[in-house]
Amino acid sequence: MDDPSFPLDAKLRASKILQSCGGQSLGSYSSSQGVSCIRENVAQYIMQRDGGIPADPDNIYLTTGASDGIASILKILVSGEEKSRTGIMIPIPQYPLYSAAISELDAIQVNYYLDEENCWALDVNELRRALYQARDYCNPKVLCIINPGNPTGQVQSRHCIEEVIHFAWEEGLFLLADEVYQDNVYSDNCKFHSFKKVLYEMGPEYFTNVELASFHSTSKGYMGECGYRGGYMEVVNLHRDIAAQLVKMLSVRLCPPVSGQAAMDVVVNPPKPEEESYNRFIREKEAVLSNLAYKAKLTEEIFNQIPGIKCNPLQGAMYAFPRIFIPDKAIQRAKELRMAPDMFYCMQLLEETGICVVPGSGFGQKEGTYHFRMTILPAVEKLKTLLQKVKEFHIKFLDEYS
Amino acid sequence: MDDPSFPLDAKLRASKILQSCGGQSLGSYSSSQGVSCIRENVAQYIMQRDGGIPADPDNIYLTTGASDGIASILKILVSGEEKSRTGIMIPIPQYPLYSAAISELDAIQVNYYLDEENCWALDVNELRRALYQARDYCNPKVLCIINPGNPTGQVQSRHCIEEVIHFAWEEGLFLLADEVYQDNVYSDNCKFHSFKKVLYEMGPEYFTNVELASFHSTSKGYMGECGYRGGYMEVVNLHRDIAAQLVKMLSVRLCPPVSGQAAMDVVVNPPKPEEESYNRFIREKEAVLSNLAYKAKLTEEIFNQIPGIKCNPLQGAMYAFPRIFIPDKAIQRAKELRMAPDMFYCMQLLEETGICVVPGSGFGQKEGTYHFRMTILPAVEKLKTLLQKVKEFHIKFLDEYS
């Protein structure tokens, strides 16, 4: 405690976490649900974030990153005799964790399409279409939402969230809200609304009935501490017997990494105004977020200057997912090479410029449309150079294949 | 690097690990298979442990503790059309990770019994019996070995390992060697032999054919750093296409916690004689291991002084798994309470003394025999008190129910 290289409040925070750990060490197993004082801090964080709506530490599960939590909840929901008929509704484009987890569980992937023409917004009519069609061949039980979107970067409006919750209530679907980008909202006209908050504000008919699991992570936001594999989920209205099975299942893996749990604690319990670290923390946090916001805008603008590329606003998250026009001759060439056309495009880009982006076919996209996902994480100058190179490549590519 | 509170070699080691991490930070994702310099150190460690037999860093996968590695390998082996007919052979008694993972995968658990009369040794004839009987109703593909044993604490002889490997070769079984207690061997007449080493010493007919995955962890040994969730597996003779699928599957969870990877590095790359930390390291390591050896002997001796308790030598690992005699009247009482008799015994022990041990029925045991598992981790004086209390309880229990 007398090391001058750390501010006092950081040392006190570390000491408080350690006191809650077995043998006062991050090297001890914690309970399978996570260190209790950290779960309490998570509940406190959620309550503050959601304007005072209560959160119960018993509903909080610390996880090995959000991915682990999502996979665990899906596993517990895909069970019983009819498990291989269980349908899981996911957005298209989606983050491929979902399709992979569904495939591992031998469950059935039910796609609903986000509306690219409308900034990748979620349309409840499209949810309804997907659900009703899927009922012909499976039993859809879970509705997955990614907000802010990955790879699409849209931020859902409050109205849209209300519609989704009403739909889940009406149709008896378990809601899974992947909210790991909750701190990454850039557009001035967008705001993050948690599903939990909206659910409670819709009244008791909803908040006592709709089953909801929502996820957060240390890997995104302004912190990006992904190597520690920290995350949590809050699960509400899960039947007590199922919750007991969930804990039993989690306990097979003993516990999430305690260092990741500690990182999660730091995220949900940041320095307060009266504390020594506060100014530095706020300065760094705001610098990171405003820098990302600047790059989000810059990326959208530059992409939209390129003929044959169309990019929706990057309202949130960390990615651009521009639509790219691929000429028929290039599609033909890709077919000859037995490649998806956007994979061919991305491989060409990689080979000619050294820039690595992920083809849209890895995330799913409407047939006949092509995209790629690119992060906006590189430093501004590097990002500018990179976008310039993509521009030159794209123009050359169009030229070559038209 | 100029902080005087850490020895120079520790700082150099930390700096080397950080240099291999993205952004020189444990907070970055690593590759899904783990940080490459750590995988190289693991391979080096295995080579030294195994008297120079080579290990390939490409065969090393860093994992979120050994449990995660074991579950991943089982998942990749239980696949294809006929997956629900896949049999996995496990020892009884077993560490319940195995039964839980098999049940999660909807695979079939094939029990082979360890020989309690013979210090819990593995008998190849019993393996053969279990395999041949299982072939009537499933397709046994994997043979799991826990050496040193958990919960049974036996250490396999070299001869026994040779027989097991020959059996696996003959029957075309995938060998899964859980060797997380490789540093925890206490009996003077026992030595740890790795399956990998014995496999190679049996000659090319074996080492080019038998598929083997072996596991290690930061959670056991003399270090016990379980909260970091560090581990590795070495997989040999896995078909290239399957290895590619394994990496793909692991990549869904991004990467194991990088702090756990770093902890694994420290385990496989300990201080060398010429380094500043060496003396302290050796002193601590030997103190921990000789203390465990003393407690292993002590526990065996005290248990065997109690009428109605019989305890095999604790040759390795961290547990006693004594056989307990439960009188008929107590078995009757347990039945009335709808409890397994050993569960009833353990609950009584807990209520009367505050001591928590795990009933043998949680690990599996021959019908009509009863056991419990107890760790030998408490400090010597505490352990003595604890054993004395178990003794008094047991005598009273026998008295009450006979």
Image (cartoon, coloured by chain):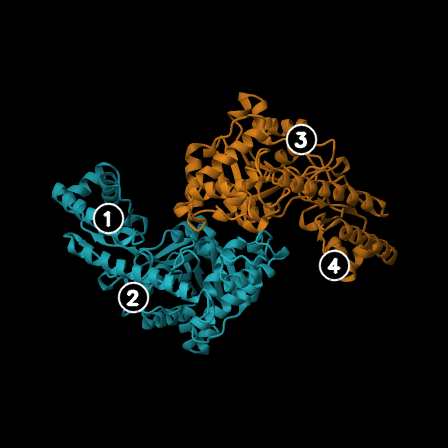
Chain colours: A cyan, B orange
Which disc is residue A232 wearing? none
Which disc is residue B124 wearing? 3
Work out whether mark 2 precedes mark 1 in sequence or the reverse, and give the earlier one. Answer: 2
Measured as percent of width and height from the top left, residue A359 is found at 28, 47
Give me the C-alpha separation between circle 3 and circle 1.
62 Å
Name the one closer to the observer, B120 or B185: B185
**B139 displayed left or right of A67:** right
Name the one closer to the observer, A227 or A110: A227
**A209 displayed left or right of A376:** right
Measured as percent of width and height from the top left, residue A203 is found at 43, 78
Circle 2 sits on which residue? A123
Question: The residue marked by circle 2 belongs to what chain?
Answer: A
Q: Residues within 10 Å of mark 1 (few under 14, many from 20)?
A: some
Work out whether mark 3 precedes mark 4 in sequence or the reverse, and give the earlier one. Answer: 3
**A233 displayed left or right of A150:** right
Measured as percent of width and height from the top left, residue A274 is found at 46, 71
Mark 4 falls on what kind of element?
helix
Question: The residue marked by circle 1 belongs to what chain?
Answer: A
Which residue: 12% across, 43% down?
A399
Q: Residues within 10 Å of mark 4 (few under 14, many from 20)?
A: some
Which residue: 14% across, 52% down?
A307
Give me the C-alpha separation between circle 3 and circle 4.
36 Å
Circle 1 sits on which residue? A386
